[in-house]
Amino acid sequence: MSDDESADDNGADAEEEQEPVDLEAIRDELASFENDVEGLDADLEAADTEDDLDVVEADLETFRDAFDELEIPEPPETDDEEDEEDEEPAPEEVLQERYDDIDSDVSDLESDLEDQRGPYGEDVVSELNSASGTITGTRWTEEGDEELLAAVDDFLETFNDLLGSDVTRAADGDNVPDQLEATLEDAVDAVEAAALDADDDAETIAGLLECCDDLQSDIDDATEWTDLKVREQMRREGFYDVLDHIKDFPPEWHALKVHEKRGNVEMILLALETFDSDFMEEHCLEALERMGPEEAIEPMLQKANRRDTAAMSILGKIGVDDDEVVETLLDYVDSNPNLQQPAFRALGEVGSEEAVQPIANQLVDENPDVRSWAARALGLIGDTRAIEPLADVLADDDEDRVRASAAWALNTIGTAEALEVVADYSDDRAYLVQVEAEKVSLEPAA
C-alpha cells in the first residue's frame, strides 16, 4: 500500500471515529439558559430606575454572548421513503426548538427593556422640532396663521406651567411661521436648560409630551393653502382683481390676457403652476413666449428638462446665455427631430458660442430637416467658426432647401468672408439660394 493510500484511509477512519455530540450536556445548558431568562424577566419587572434598567441591559448582553456560542447539532439525515408523519422528531430537532423559544423570549425582553426606558427630555425636543418643521414647511391660509397662533399660545400656557419656564411668543420673524419657529426654538432651549431626568422628572416629561401631541394635533387641524379650491386660491392671490367684467370665458383666460398686457409675469407663472388645465397651460406658455421674461427661466428650465418643447422655445425667446440654460438645451442637440428643432432654435436665439460645434456636427445628419435647422441655428448664433462648415453645405448638400438655409445663415453672420461665399451663388440652380445671393452687397458702406 502506498503512503498516499495509507493517508487517505487514516483520514476516512478519523471521520468515522469523530466523538459523538453530548446531547445531554446541551439539554442541561438549555435548562440553565431557561432559568436565566426567568431571572432576567423578574429583574426587568422589578426595575424602577434608569440605573436598574442599565443593569438589566448589561445582564442581557452577557446572556446573549454566552447563548450565541451554543451550537445545536444538525439532525441525522432520514430515509425519504420512511413515513415522516409517524416518526418521532430527532433529539436534535427538539433541542433546536427549545433554543429558538429561548431566543424569542430574550428578544421580547430586549424589546420590553427599550419600552420601559424614558421618556426623556430629548423626546420632548424631538417633538418640538417636528412641530416647527411642519409649521415652516407648509403654506398656510390667513385663517391657518390665526389658528397656529392660537395653538402655540395654548401650548405655551401648559408648557410653562409644567416646566416652570416663562417662554413667550417671539416677536421676530417676517411671517407667522417664522415667528412660531423662533418661539419653539425658545421652548427647546428651555427644555434643554431644565436638564430633565428620566427618573426624577418622569411625570413632567410625560406631561410635556402630551402637551406636544396636543400642539401637533392643532397644527394638523389648521387650514393649509392646499385645503382651498384652486379658484379660491387664485382669488386670494389677486389673480382676478384685474377684471372689471368677464369678457372671455373662462374668466381665468380673460384675466391671463390682462396680466400679459400689463406685464404681470408673476401672475402668469402663478397661473401656470396652479391651474390643472391643459387649456390654461397652453395659453400661459404662449403668453410667456410672447413676453420672454427672465423671471420665467427657472420654471422653464424645469419643464425643458422634462422634454417640454414649448419651454425650450420660451428659453430661446428669453435669450439669456446662461450656463444652465445652454446645458439643458445641449442635451437635445443629438436627440430626435421633435426635440432637436426647438433646441437648435433656442440655442441660436440665445447666441451660445458653446453650442457652435455640437450644432455644426449635425450638418451631416442624414435627415435634411435636421441639417436645415442646424444651419439656421448657426446663423442666429453668428459665430465665424461656422462659416467653413456652412460653406461646405452650400457647395455639396444634395437638398436645395438645406443649401438655402446655409446661404441664409452665412448672410445672417454677415462678415465679409461669409458674404463673399454666398455672393458666388447668384446663378445657382436653386431659386432660394439665388435669393440669398442677391441680398449680398459687397460694396463698403458709405
Image (cartoon, rainbow, N blue to C red):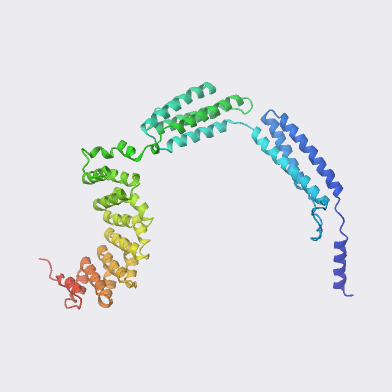
Asked if residue 172 can be seen in this view, the reply is no
**89 up-or-down from 444: above or below:** above
Instruction: Please state the horizontal and vertical placement of residue 350, each as a whole percent of the image.
Output: 28, 58
Relative to residue 80, is residue 355 drawn left or right? left
Asked if residue 276 can be seen in this view, the reply is yes
Relative to residue 115, is residue 441 drawn left or right? left
Q: Quadrant of residue 416?
A: bottom left
Q: Quadrant of residue 404?
A: bottom left
Query: Residue at the spot x=69%, y=28% of the render?
Result: 48
Query: Residue at the spot x=64%, y=33% of the render?
Result: 117
Looking at the picture, tell me which residue is in the foreground, 146 or 19.
146
**272 up-or-down from 307: above or below:** above
Relative to residue 401, is residue 116 drawn left or right? right
**42 up-or-down from 415: above or below:** above
Looking at the picture, tell me which residue is in the foreground, 297 or 108.
108
Looking at the picture, tell me which residue is in the foreground, 241 or 58.
241
Query: In which quadrant of the rendered image does the N terminus lie?
Result: bottom right
Instruction: Please state the horizontal and vertical placement of residue 260, each as a whole percent of the image.
Output: 23, 46
Query: Residue at the spot x=38%, y=55% of the render?
Result: 306
**199 up-or-down from 88: above or below:** above
Query: In which quadrant of the rendered image does the C terminus lie?
Result: bottom left
Instruction: Please state the horizontal and vertical placement of residue 188, each as a whole percent of the image.
Output: 50, 30
Relative to residue 111, is residue 121 drawn left or right? left
Instruction: Please state the horizontal and vertical placement of residue 294, each as a whole percent of the image.
Output: 28, 50
Label tally: 0
